[in-house]
């Protein structure tokens, strides 16, 4: 018990904010994306032994589309994603490059009430891989990174009777910067 408590005591805990932008388009033709590209939310990171860490975020974004077919149609919704990531930092002084991978559930969808496909419960899941670097000045931590997410199904689905069908892309690339404060 004493050995375990000493190992846990030595680990770092960082609280902060993550923000950035989506680099990829979110809808496919014939719709035009009306989503806001910004992503923002709180983050927490727990340092583990041997260069590993676990990070959890709650990221907000606004998703939507514009489609002109028999009149203009604009739909949008709030979207929350909750990535849970395992990170590995390379033991390099000053700049700490890292790789990350994990799982990201997302809540929020856009579709017409009468045309939502069966199984469209508003929850999508994605596999995340990425990388970045962490810089530290005292207790302040700044971490620019890039993430790739492959979603299991589209968040935006539109089925129009006697018209085209379109959906959101299932591949997403985000550029984020985390700014945190190391508590221990």
Image (spheres, helix red, strand yellow):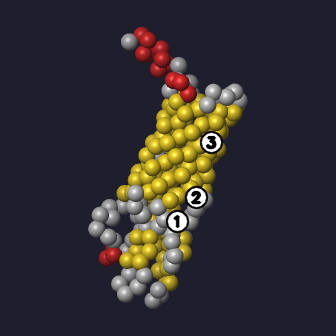
Q: Answer few, some or many: residues within 10 Å of disc 3's Cα (few below 14, many 20 plus, some between 14 and 19).
A: many
Tags 2 and 1 touching, CB below 8 Å: yes
Mark 2 → mark 3, Cα distance in angstroms: 16 Å
Q: Nearer the viewer, mark 2 or mark 3?
A: 3
Q: Earlier in the sequence, mark 3 or mark 1?
A: 1
Quadrant of the drawing holding the C terminus: top right
Task: Determine the residue positioned at 58% across, 54% down.
Answer: 174
Question: Residue 158 location, x and y as percent?
Answer: 40, 74
Q: Where is 7 relative to 73, above or below?
A: above
Question: Residue 170 location, x and y as percent?
Answer: 47, 61
Question: Residue 117 location, x and y as percent?
Answer: 32, 70
User: Which numbered marker is on residue 132?
Assistant: 3
Mark 3 → mark 1, Cα distance in angstroms: 23 Å
Q: Secondary structure at mark 2?
A: strand
Q: Which residue is mark 1?
A: 26
Mark 2 → mark 1, Cα distance in angstroms: 9 Å
Return the residue nearer the eye: 63 or 163.
163
Q: Answer few, some or many: residues within 10 Å of disc 1's Cα (few below 14, many 20 plus, some between 14 and 19).
A: many
In the displayed orientation, state which residue is furthest to the left.
118
Q: Which residue is mark 2?
A: 22
Residue 45 appears anywhere in the view = no
Q: Answer few, some or many: residues within 10 Å of disc 2's Cα (few below 14, many 20 plus, some between 14 and 19).
A: many
Q: Secondary structure at mark 3?
A: strand
């Amino acid at each position: 018990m004493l050995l375990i408590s000493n190992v846990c005591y030595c680990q770092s805990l960082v609280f902060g904010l993550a923000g950035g932008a989506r680099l990829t388009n979110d809808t496919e033709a014939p719709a035009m994306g009306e989503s806001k590209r910004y992503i923002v939310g709180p983050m927490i990171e727990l340092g583990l032994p041997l260069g590993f860490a676990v990070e959890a975020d709650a990221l907000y974004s606004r998703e939507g589309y514009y489609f002109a077919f028999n009149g203009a149609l604009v739909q949008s919704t709030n979207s929350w994603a909750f990535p849970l990531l395992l990170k590995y930092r390379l033991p390099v002084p000053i700049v700490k490059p890292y790789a990350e991978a994990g799982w990201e559930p997302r809540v929020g969808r856009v579709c017409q009430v009468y045309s939502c496909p069966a199984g469209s419960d508003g929850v999508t899941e994605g596999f995340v891989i990425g990388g970045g670097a962490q810089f530290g000045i005292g207790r302040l931590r700044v971490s620019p990174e890039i993430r790739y997410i492959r979603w299991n199904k589209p968040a935006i689905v539109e089925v129009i009777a006697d018209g085209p069908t379109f959906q959101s892309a299932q591949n997403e690339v985000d550029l984020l910067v985390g700014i945190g404060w190391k508590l221990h």
